[in-house]
């Protein structure tokens, strides 16, 4: 979870505490008025739990200021803009998420990206994408509109072939060995990945497992036009647009670039991963 997100959550908690103290009720008494556990009031006030729309509306009513519900919900909306849980994002299905990325990538001129354990979506074959989206739905228990999601994800690749776009992609070599679909389909995915090397719109590097690096490949991230970072965690997507965050992630990308292999060396690493597959 980002520092900015936590600070925003703590700021919202401080505002909730201010409203509660104006009632001259302690935490236990305020929780009783709400019909909640005392611990929930404490977690919300101390930024240890993210409130819901219903939580902040109930808090405003319990504090005797129902008219402040809109203010509190706006604060919550700003908070959710930075931190988007995958369960909530996928409530409407994979297609909606993929179509949002279609628009985002079509509008972007330059994207710098890094992936540590997966082939980037813009380079995926339909079979590989089908395996990934199925795994996500099974893991999170979300809507299984797999085929619609796959079709939308394939549409994302159109931007790769359009003039005016540049994709600077770095992949940790380990991602080439993470099998997300049947071995034959994984072999086709790696062959497909090799085909992007040399495209005018794509710079594709692979960071070898044996390379000496001054960083650990913690999570994937995309830098959109030097103005927005989209970073993935296990259960959420972070959208970071402060200049400090963007500059930090760009510095990390530059360090990764220095450790990466390109052109024929990248081809060799991808070919080695393909040869390691058990296709019998």
Image: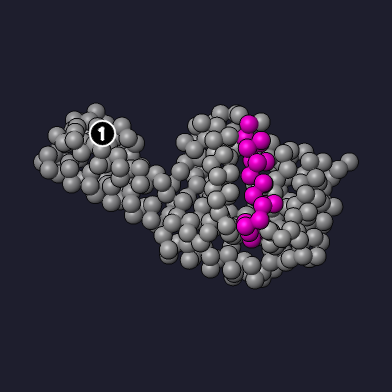
Q: Which residues are magenta?
A: 148-169
Q: Position of residue 133 (x, y in %)?
A: 63, 37
Q: Is residue 63 left or right of residue 162?
A: left
- At x 53%, y 68%, the residue is 251
Magenta stretch: dominant SS? helix
Give the residue pinned by disc 1: 57
Q: Is residue 244 left or right of residue 58?
A: right
Circle 1 SS class: helix
Q: Position of residue 252 (x, y in %)?
A: 55, 66
Q: Position of residue 6 (x, y in %)?
A: 37, 52
- Picture layout, residue 276 above or below residue 89: below
Q: Is residue 11 left or right of residue 210?
A: left
Q: Quadrant of residue 33?
A: top left
Q: Position of residue 204 (x, y in %)?
A: 70, 60
Near-viewer residue (42 or 161):
161
Q: Is residue 46 magenta?
A: no
- Picture layout, residue 274 above or below residue 264: above
- At x 70%, y 45%, the residue is 124
Q: Quadrant of residue 65?
A: top left
Q: Is residue 154 visible?
A: yes
């Amino acid at each position: 979870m980002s520092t900015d997100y936590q600070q925003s959550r703590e700021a919202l908690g401080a505002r909730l505490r201010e409203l509660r103290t104006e009632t001259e009720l302690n935490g236990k008494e305020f929780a009783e008025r709400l019909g909640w556990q005392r611990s929930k009031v404490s977690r919300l006030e101390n930024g240890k739990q993210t409130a819901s729309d219903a939580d902040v509306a109930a808090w405003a009513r319990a504090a005797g200021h129902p008219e402040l519900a809109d203010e509190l919900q706006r604060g919550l909306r700003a908070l959710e803009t930075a931190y988007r849980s995958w369960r909530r994002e996928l409530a409407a299905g994979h297609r909606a998420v993929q179509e949002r990325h279609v628009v985002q990538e079509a509008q972007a001129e330059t994207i710098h990206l890094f992936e540590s354990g997966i082939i980037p979506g813009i380079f995926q074959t339909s079979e590989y994408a089908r395996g990934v989206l199925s795994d996500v739905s099974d893991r999170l228990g979300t809507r299984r509109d797999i085929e619609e999601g796959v079709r939308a994800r394939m549409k994302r690749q159109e931007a790769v072939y359009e003039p005016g776009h540049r994709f600077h992609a770095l992949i940790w070599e380990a991602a080439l060995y993470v099998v997300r679909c049947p071995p034959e389909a994984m072999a086709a995915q790696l062959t497909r990945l090799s085909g992007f090397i040399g495209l005018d719109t794509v710079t594709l590097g692979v960071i070898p497992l044996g390379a000496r690096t001054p960083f650990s490949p913690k999570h994937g991230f995309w830098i959109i036009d030097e103005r927005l970072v989209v970073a993935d965690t296990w259960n959420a997507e972070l959208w970071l647009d402060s200049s400090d965050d963007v500059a930090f992630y760009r510095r990390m990308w530059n360090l990764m670039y220095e450790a990466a292999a390109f052109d024929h060396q990248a081809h060799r690493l991808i070919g080695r991963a393909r040869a390691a597959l058990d296709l019998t």
